[in-house]
Structures are given as structure tokens and as C-alpha cells.
Amino acid sequence: MFYREAGQFKTSYGADQQILPIRQDRIGMVVLLAVAFLGVPMFASEYWFSAILIPFLIFALAALGLNILTGYAGQLSLGSAAFMAVGAYAAYNFQLRIEGIPILVSFLLGGVVAAGVGILFGLPSLRIKGFYLAVATLAAQFFIVWCLTKFPWLSNNSSSGVISAQKIIIFGHEFNSPQDKYLLVLGIVVVLALAAKNLVRGNVGRSWMAVRDMDVAAEVIGFRIMRTKLTAFAVSSFYCGVAGALYAFCYLGSVEPDGFSLELSFKILFMIIIGGVGSILGSFVGAAFILLLPVLLDVLLPALSETLSLPVDGASISHIQTMIFGALIMFFLIVEPHGLARLWQIAKEKLRLWPFPH
Amino acid sequence: MQFFFEILIGGLLSGVMYSLVALGFVLIYKASGVFNFAQGAMVYFAALSVVGCMEKGAPLWLALILAFFIMLLFGMATEKFVLRKMVNQTPISLFMATIGLTFFVEGFAPLVWGHSVRGLDIGIVDEPIESVLDSLGIVVSRFDLVAALIAGLLVTGLALFFQYTRVGRALRAVADDHQAALSIGIPLERIWAIVWGVAGFVALVAGMLWGARNGVQFALTFTALKALPVLILGGFTSVPGAIVGGLIIGASEKLAEVYIPPVMQAMFGGNFGGIEGWFPYVLALLFLLVRPEGLFGEKHIDRV
Amino acid sequence: MFKQFKSVACAAAVAAVFAAPGAAMADDQFFPIPSYRVGPYGANGEAFYGGFIDYLNYVNMKNGGINGVKITWEECETEYNNAKGVECYERLKSKAKVSAGPIHTMSTGISYALVDKSAQDKLPLAMMGYGRTDAVDGSVFPYAFPLITTYQMQASAIVKFLKDKEKGSLDGKKIVFLYHDSAYGKEPIVALEAESRLNKFNLVQIPVAHPGNEQGAQWLKIRQEKPDYVIFWGWGVMNQTALKAAQKVGYPRDKIVGSWWAGSEEDTVPAGDAAKGYMSATWNVAGKSVPLIADIEKVVYAGGHGNLKDKSKLGTILYNRGVSAAVVSVEAIYKAQEKYGKGKSMTGEQVRWGLENLNVTDARIKTLGATGLLPEVKTSCSNHEGSGKVKIQQWDGAKWVPVSDWIEGNKSLIHPLFEASAKQYAKEKGITPRDCSKEK
């Protein structure tokens, strides 16, 4: 009843091409951002900031990166965690070795370094496709992590290969409390998400999608395959790299190369599959789902078994959680293979006609 | 030189162990186009079922048979409740579903059988064969040799099965073209169930051997990571490819672990060992650049 | 309408779940326990945390708590995963505001991630035999306690043990250090290098890539090197694989000495005969012959309050280690109560003081019935380790048998390494170290 575009006239090309063409969407987005920037900091507890919201935003950013590569450019990658590691270690080293470099510049440079590495490991994609490529990206995953453990210079000669992120100081203000860190991460993620949205709407994004849908055809109509695929790898790795830097600086505080394991790569892949491949919104929804589900199960199951007084011990509960997690992934793939973002889209379609569907 | 051959033989024999796991991937991919990531978890589940049955008092042979039936049931259930509902979806969705399946199995198997680390004694002592050690001074493990033998038998058996039985022919038909196979009356669903059953059997053999070698525990799921480079090297659709790929990966990985780090050490200083994690992948990657469809894979021609 | 109601109800349920749970009862002593029982190392976590919780239960049932203060606790599954560990910590933290026992993560990665956070939140982080080893220097790390011993001190103690075995000299001997290629495996390298310079033995380092289920090449290399001893730093599947691979190349197992993470029943039983004769370091003995363990079985399990489903794990190395970790934690709270008031629950800050002023004497250990479970522990501001002693044990094919008395690592060689590392950390982080002479 309230969600429809009737009566909203567009009088310029600009108005027609804006990201959110419907007024209600625009209002919704403004409200959402207001809540995220103003409402949440007022009400959220420390646990919410450091255990849920910050990792959610960071993982959403990484998922966004992977989604650009997998969802828009059609190149399946299992090495996202390694690119996060590159970003984290690069940002650390820029902070360490260049006196007085602003931290935001370090984050960006971390992303740039990751993009460079991404291009390097994207080269095989020019010859290899599909699952062969997916397995080949595992080479990046294992090789990069190995390099980080083997060259002590990268971790400032720490005997264990662990790095501790430096303090975050911007314009003399130290971002120390979870709330500050949340706002910082939120700001970066919002800017980058907006950039991604515009990128995929534009020329670059269209060329990615053309290559994804059929690369031979795309080549025939004049897209340069090499440049298109490599920009996808570069942009994707840039996002993962920045996410990695934030992961180290704003979330964990100290990281070891082994932390950026294959498991983490898979987790990010889950996010985009559950959330929606080829959807910016899907990256966020997927990240929220994958992060919150285990926590929810963690809290619910013991409570449940207690109230029903089931004779289940701690280990069994943990096993059941793993099972449910796996089963839910399968369930979602069966029910909605296009992800949660698609559900949202369907809901919107329905809403526009509600309460008088034809 | 003696040392070189020792490493080479050890590597080849380890490679056979990788092939065993890779074989399970190939079977399923060949018959249904599904890249079954859960193969590693199935290896774990199969091995756990064996030791689980033995703990309940069954002798080894009975435990193996019971475990085989459990794997068969599992395969059929997977087909019925997951794959059948996902017909016509993109390969990546199917792949993701098997990752979901991996989680499910990783929770389910220890829930049923317990998750403490257990040994599995299949009656072969893993010691150097003395006659070879005495005459050539080369260590050849008796266990690995037996494992290689079993793998050889398995591959021959599978090859014969594919070539000469009715079901085998149907399998190949399904692999070539789902729709064509359906249209001439091959029951797709039953064929898939059979393939998953056979893959379960391969997982059982792999689980038994790996379990006897390293203990039955969660880490058996990691065997999948050893099998993936074998898979890309040999091609996703080739049974002999899995064996040859395994031999190449096993041998080169061991030789590289011994001979490359000292070279790097001379170049950069520091200790560069532990390259076994990534070396097979990089090797497979380089190989793919030359031959993108793997050693024995089918060449894919794109049409617009 | 009903649908709407349902979704509202769901949302409410979710909100209720995530709403910050109320703090534990003010007069109870709360223990936040980020544990793990699934995943690749689940079997190890099961035994350790089983022992830990059983002892807490035991204190409640036997003594009615710590000077009458009941112990409560909450577990959170970390899966040995750093990110999940942090989430668990944050979740448990909100309940640990009023009172908090030491946090044991039993994971080097997680404890690294928590070192800074716990100091900020004023919660004591115990890392018994793992984690950030330079936290021995309490002036830089007030809230982190690598209690009893560290990787470096342990490596040094193993060298000392081998030296005694070789009648006092390792001159010209060759020792291979075979390690898990991660933070865990790399920590002792500095110590071993220092030892090799001091004792003039030849050190060969051979890393094994994670997860270590293939070690053919490494052991053939060892066979070729023909070392006098192998010092072994493995974890999880790497341990059984190493023992099997040693058998495969015919390397005698009684020349291999493992770290304490490579010396439990979980590591040797699955390896079968291949494990016989293998030695490892430990700070606690195995078996139910320890009076305390027997008593726990009697008091806790007879009442049906045991934490373990599989009672056969009682008295295993890792179970007993969990008990020893709980003993030290509870002792720290006793100590804190001495200063801040008997019969009261202690905050994290107060427990920290207790941990820093621990003095668990042999006599006290004997009263507890824990003889053999842990060495004497005496901590101070400048020494958060408090002991640095280990025993060497040997697997006889069925059980672990101690083959040495307490061996202390070379403190004067190793501790300066910690101080240097801590100093660098303080500089990187801009921390001003406390003045330990002013602490009391």
C-alpha cells in the first residue's frame, strides 16, 4: 500500500538512472544509514560491537569483493582469505615502515597491494575455467599464507609470524573503543559498497557480466577478455585486501598467517552463495546470516536442551550445531538457489502490488 | 642417488594414497557433473563407521561390510534428499550443496560414533621391507606397498565395471548426456544412487587405509585437500587420470620438499621447508596453463 | 495475521537471545570458559575442558566452593578458530563483569588475539603452556599469564634432559627439530638456537606443513641425517603420522622427544605399536593414582555430575592437565581472597593480583592431593611463568610413565629472550611497562 512508485515522475536521465529509483527505497536507505550511524552506537552493547557488528561489516566487505569476482565476473575463487592476509600484512608494514603515514592510506595501500597480487594469481584465469580455476585459486591460498610465514621481514621478525596491529589514530583521535572502531569500519564499508554498486552498474560491471555469461560471445562483440578478467581480479582483491586490513586492525588486533585459512575463504564463499551471487545486497545479507546463525545456534541449543531436559552433553551440542549449519546451507540452496537477496527482491515485487495482487 | 630413489619411491607410494581419495571425486563428477566436496568427509565417516562397528564388537571383516552398507545408505540418502531436489541447478550451486553436506557429515559422524582419536589395525605392520633395505639400502614401506596394490585392484575393478557391466554402460551414458540417457530409458535417479554408493565404497577403502596409517580422526577430512591437485592434474573425468595424477603429485611433492628448500635457503636465507601444502597446487596450476583440461580430461569446445 | 504474529514472536525470541544476558549472581565466582569440542582438535579439547570443569564442580561439591563462594561457569564453543574465539570471549565478557576466573583458551591463536583485549577489559588470561610466551614479562603484559612453563623453557628443559642422557655433553651431537609450521611450532626455535650455540650441538630444523598428515619426505630426510635425537613439536594428526612415519623409516622412537602437546594418549594410542618408547615433555602425570583424580571420580562422577560422557578419558594426560589448570586457577582465587576479602567473589582485576602472587608450594599441592599434577608455582610481576619445570614421560605401549624428575629449563638463557621480545612489543604498541619493583 505504501510501497509503490505511482505518482513519481522522472523528468531527467539522472533521475531515471539513480541507484534507488523509488522514493520509498531512498527513504528506507536514509533511515537505515541513520540507524547504522546514529541509532546503533547509542543502543548497542560492547558485545554487539566487537563480536557481531564489526565482523559483520568486515566480512560483508570481503564477501562483496568475492561477489564482484564470482558473482559479476563469473570466476569462482577459493582464495579470498589469502588476499585478506595480503591486505592485513601490507597495511601493517606500511604503518610500521613509513613514518607518519595516515592509517587510512595504509588500509588503501593494503588493498592496492592485494590487488596487485590478485592480478598475478588472476592470470591463469585467462586459460582455465570453472572448477579447474577454483582449485587453481587454492594455489594462491596456500602459497600466500606460506610466504607470510616464511619471510620474517613481513611480520617484523616476530618469532611466531604473528603481527599485532598498531593503534588507529586519525587526526589525533585514537579509535580505541569498540564503538569508534565500528563507526570507522562502517564509514569505510559504506563508501566502498557505494563505489561497488556504481562500478557494477557502469561500463566495467557490464563487461564483467558479459564475460560471465559467455566469454566467447563477449570477446566476439569486442570486450577485451584479458583486461576485463584482470580488472575483476584486481577490484575483488582490493576489496578483500581492505577487508583484511580492517580484520587485523579493527577486529582481532593481532593475526597470524594461519588465521587466514582455507576455512575463512570458504566462509566468505558461503556468504555470497547464501546471500545471493551477483548482488551487492546479497553480500551483506549473506554475511549476516553466516555470522549470526552459529551464534544463534550456540545460544539457543543449550537453552533448548536444558528446558526439555535432554541428556545432551556439550560435545554433542556442538556436533548438532555443525549438522544444522550444513543442513541449512543445503536447505537454502534447494529452496532458493539465488540466495536471500532474491527473496528480498520477490518480497518487494509482492509489496508493490499488496494488498491488491492481480 | 640412493636417497633420491628412496624419496621417489616413497613419493609414488604416497601418491597412490592420494589417488584413492581423488578417485571418489572423479566417480561422482563423471556420472553427475557434481564436484563433490564432501568426499573428504565421507572418508572420515567411512573410517569412523569401521572403528565404530569394531568397538561394538564386530570383527574387522564384518565391520567393513557394515560400514559399506552404511556408506551405501548415506549415498542413497544424499541423492534422494539433496541432489534430486537440485536437478537443473548450476554446477556451483551443486558444489555448494556438497560443502553443506560436508558440514553435516562432520557433525553427524562424530555424533554417532564419538570423536576421540582411534587407531585402526588392519593387520599390516608399517615397517621397511627388510630384504629391500638390506640389498639396496632403500626404505620401502610394506604398508604403502599393500595400499598401492589395493588401489591397483580397485582401479582395475572400476575400469572393468565401467566397461563391461550394464550399469557401467548406463553410467557412461549418463555422464555423456543426462537428457539423452533419460530419453532412452536409463533411470537417472537410480544411476546416481549407484554412483554415490560406489563413491562411498571408494571412500571406505581410502578411509580404511588412511585411518590405519594416521589414526581415525577428524583430520581424515583433510585428505580431500591432498586429492584436489591430483584431480586437476589428472582431469576431473578420468579414472586413470586420478592414478597417474596421484603418482606425479606424490613423487614431485616429496622430491620438491627435499630438494627445493635448500635452494631457496641459499637464495634468501632462513628456513623454507614445509612447501608440501602449496607445491602440488602450483604444479597443477602450471600444468593447467599448458593443458587446461588436465592430463586425461575431455577437451571442452566453446560454442557461441 | 497469524503469520505476522509468528514473525514478531520469532523476532522477540531472537532479540531475547541476543540481549546482553544478565551478569552472573553477584556472590558467585564466575568462570568464562571458551572451550572447543568439535573440529580437528575437538578430542583434545574434550579431555582438557572435561578435567577443568570437573575440578570446578569438585570444589563446589566437596568444599562448598572457594571459602564458601560457589563457582559458576559458562562454556562457549570456539572450534579452535580465532574469530569464533573472539566472539566467545566478547559474549562471556559481558557476564564476567562482577567476577571472573582466569580464561583458558587452549589455543595459541586465540590467546594472541585476546592478549590486548583482555588487558583492556581487565580480565586475566591464562595460557598454560601455550600462547604469547614473552608475556612471562609481567611488566608489559599485566593480564597475560603463561603459567607453569612456556615453549622456550620447555625446549630448553628437553635439551637439558638429553644432555643428562648423554652424560653431560651434547658437543658434536646432531638434533633434528621437526615442527608444525605455525606460530606454535616456530616459537621454540629461538630457544633451541641459543641452546645449540651454548651446548655446541648441531641443530637441523625441518618444518611440516599444516595439517601434517603426510611426512614421508621429512622422515626420509631424518633417516638420511641420522640425528642422535629428534625434538618434535607436533599437534593433532601430525603426531600419530610422525610416529608411524618414524616406524616406516625405522627411526627408533625412544630417540624422539615431543612437546607436551604431542604427548597425550590421543597421540599415542592411535599410532599403536609405533608409539612404544616415544618420549614427551609434560607437567602433569597421567593416571588415576593421583589422589585428587581418584577423588574427583568418587565425588563428582558417583553423583552423576561428571562433565565427560566417555569416562574412559578420566586420568588421561589431557584430562589431568585440565584439572591442573583448574587447580592453579582456583588457587589464584584463594590468594586473591586473602587480600581482598575471604568469602567474596573476585573481579578479574583481583584475580589478576592473585595470579601474579601465586605461591603453590609442594605442601599445598600435597594437601590438595595433586602431587605430580603440577610443579611448585611461584609467580611475580617480573615472572608470570612461575615455574619453568617439566617432566619427561615415556609411552610404554599402554600408558605414559614419567622417566625423569622435574627439569627446569635454562632460565638465565631463555628469560632474557622474553624480556627483549616484550620490550619490542611495548615499543610497537606504545605501552609503558610497569615498574615491577613497586608492585607488591
Image: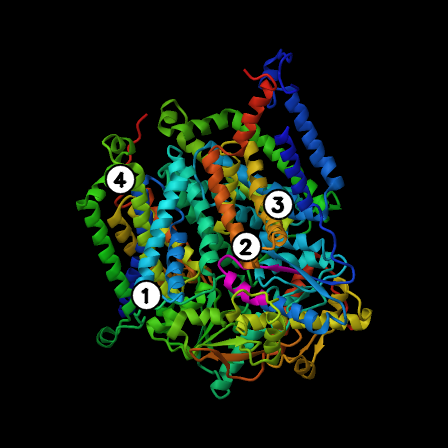
Q: Circle 4 — which element?
A: loop
Residue A56's x, y, as percent?
A: 61, 42
Residue bearing the label numbered 2: A318
Residue bearing the label numbered 3: A55
User: Is residue B260 or residue C302 the one in the foreground?
Assistant: C302
Q: Is residue C250 left or right of residue C280?
A: left
User: Is residue C355 or residue C388 the one in the foreground?
Assistant: C355
Mark 2 on the same chain as mark 3: yes
Pair 2/1: label in front: 1
Q: Is residue C287 above or below residue C136?
A: below
Which span of residues is magenta-colored? C32-50
Residue A191's x, y, as percent?
A: 63, 34
Instruction: Please give the chain letter of the residue carrying mark 2.
Output: A
- Label 1 amino acid? Leu
Residue B60, label in figure:
1
Q: Circle 2 — which element?
A: helix
Q: Circle 1 — which element?
A: helix
Q: Is residue B83 left or right of residue C125?
A: left
- Label 2 amino acid? Ser
Residue C289's x, y, as percent?
A: 56, 81
- Label 3 amino acid? Pro
Residue bearing the label numbered 4: B298
